[in-house]
Image (cartoon, rainbow, N blue to C red):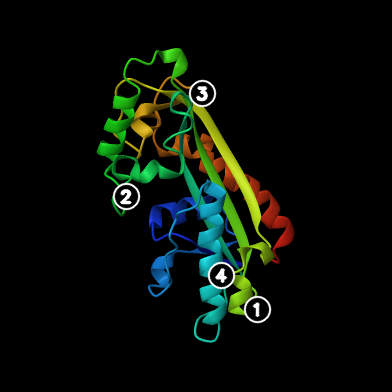
Amino acid sequence: MPRLVIATRNDHKVAEIQAMLGSGFECESLRQYPAAPQAVEDGDTFADNARKKAATLAAWFSEKNSGIPAVDWVLADDSGLEVDALNGAPGVHSARFAALDAPGNAPDADNNAKLLRLLAGVPPARRTARFRCVLVVLPIARRQAVDQLQAAADLEFTVFEGVCEGIILEAARGQHGFGYDPLFVPAGQAKTFAELGDEIKNRISHRSRALELARKTLVKVLPG
């Protein structure tokens, strides 16, 4: 069975990805590899960050191939919120929107408060936004030189993108989800992601759409 390491230590995300890809794949969290490096996500786009995370892990697994079980592929993603009235912000800075000049992510409440503050007075018709997810799948060449793996131009990246359009409310609603979910109403729905709950959200979200594209490709190209 093909083994994929997901570039996250978030077990909830790994379980979500495993459910989407199905039982034909074995998905592992970075929690199983505590020494694995964490890439600095300083790219200008979601794709840049996803590629960087995948390349960093592929290089590490290639270097450590004699000391860990065989892993076939690395799967990495980057995602965030793009608000039209803010020229696409917060974008790649979504997780640290309220603390752009400080290291690490900002609390969800702070990010939401900043978003509402910047959108104060913007009418509903102009509060359009979207969640975007870019997902990268990268094969691990077990005997490939580490310096080659670190040269992104030489890597066989397979990129998938999912988008969920919607609007930003003037006040938060709902107790589920995380991040900007209480403020975001996806197109075709009357409730926020935080009100819809995980089951519905995971069917229509940006990540689920990117993962469905990945699944359709992976079942064709990965040996079973």
Image quarter where the C terminus lies is: bottom right
Mark 4–mark 1 Cα distance, whole angstroms, equals 10 Å
The residue tagged 1 is 144
Mark 1 vs mark 3, foreground winner is 1
Residue at the outermost front position: 101
Residue 78 is tagged as none
Residue 58 is tagged as 4
Q: Residue 115: x and y, percent?
A: 33, 30
Q: Secondary structure at mark 3?
A: loop
Closer to the chain start, of discs 2 and 4, is: 4
Q: Residue 37: x and y, percent?
A: 43, 70
Residues at marks 1 and 2 touching, judged by CB atoms closer than 8 Å: no
Mark 2–mark 4 Cα distance, whole angstroms, equals 25 Å
Picture residue at 38% right of the left edge, 56% below the top? 10
Closer to the chain start, of discs 1 and 2, is: 2
Q: Residue 101: x and y, percent?
A: 30, 47
Residue at the outermost bottom position: 66
The residue tagged 2 is 105
Closer to the chain start, of discs 3 and 2, is: 2
Mark 3 vs mark 4, foreground winner is 4
Q: Amino acid at mark 4?
A: Ala
Give whichever of 64, 99 is nearer the camera: 99
Q: Say whether residue 65 is left or right of residue 35.
A: right
Instruction: Give the class, few, some or many, for how many residues have Cα within 10 Å of label 4's Cα (few <14, many ≥20).
Output: many
Give whichever of 7, 27 is nearer the camera: 7
Picture residue at 66% right of the left edge, 62% below the top? 153
